[in-house]
Amino acid sequence: MDDADQQARRAAAQAVIGKHGRLIRSARDGKLLSAGMLPLFRLRVPRGYGVLTTTGRKTGLPRPKCVRVLRDGDRAYLVQLMPPQITVEQPGAVNAWLRNVRADPRVTVELCDGTHSGTAREITDPAELDTARALLCDTIVPLDFGECAIHLRGLPSRAKIRDLHAYWFRTGRAVAIDLNV
């Protein structure tokens, strides 16, 4: 990532930092939230979300993570999320699950329609980025209202959800999973 990308991410995070709530302020907070949601997602994965399982790059063990993920045909799309506080300080920061994907792109993803294996990759093609952006930013599912309440101050709304998803897309890294169908 070059300096211009890092500055753009930092500026985007600074612009919204006051709108974000105090619940998710660090990578550790996000990890705890995902761990708390995992047992519920294992019972029934909600539409628009899933459990991404990567292989730990150091341990070789399966590493499940609750993520917002949407399927489009033989691909699933997700984006790495970083709280604005971290993005301001470290605009090049990368989540552990993405570091695991970089080390071993073979993943499984549990969706509401079943469990799928596939190959994950960061999206670099502009046309595919547009497809992922449209899908991830414009699709709103019921659980997004709870997600918005956790991340942003005030009552959730469709507009706030779209803005939140657009922020994540601007500051995160978009990932596609080519599903083995």
Image (tube, rainbow, N blue to C red):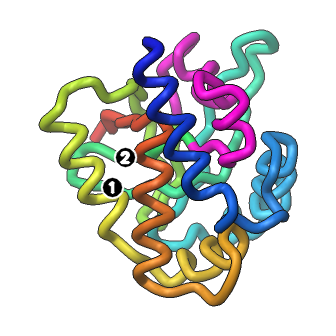
Can residue 48 be found in the magenta stretch? no
Could you tell me residue 151's position as x and y percent?
A: 68, 66
Q: Is residue 117 above or below residue 41?
A: above
Q: Which mark is residue 71?
A: 1
- Give me the residue at 81% from left, 14% from top: 59
Q: Secondary structure at mark 2?
A: strand
- Give me the residue at 57% from left, 82% from top: 145
Q: Is residue 140 above or below residue 66?
A: below
Quadrant housing residue 175: top left
- Give me the residue at 60% from left, 28% from top: 91
Lateral position of residue 84 relative to residue 6, left or right: right
Magenta residues (range): 81-107
Q: Nearer the viewer, residue 61 or 177?
A: 177
Q: Amino acid at mark 2?
A: Tyr
Quadrant housing residue 92: top right
Measured in 3D between alpha carbons, the distance from the residue under mark 1 to the one under mark 2, in whole angstroms, is 6 Å
User: Mark 2 = which residue?
Assistant: 77
Q: Secondary structure at mark 1?
A: strand
Marks 1 and 2 in Cβ contact (< 8 Å): yes
Tell which tag, 1 or 2, sits nearer the viewer: 2
Q: Amino acid at mark 1?
A: Arg
Could you tell me residue 66's position as x and y percent?
A: 65, 53
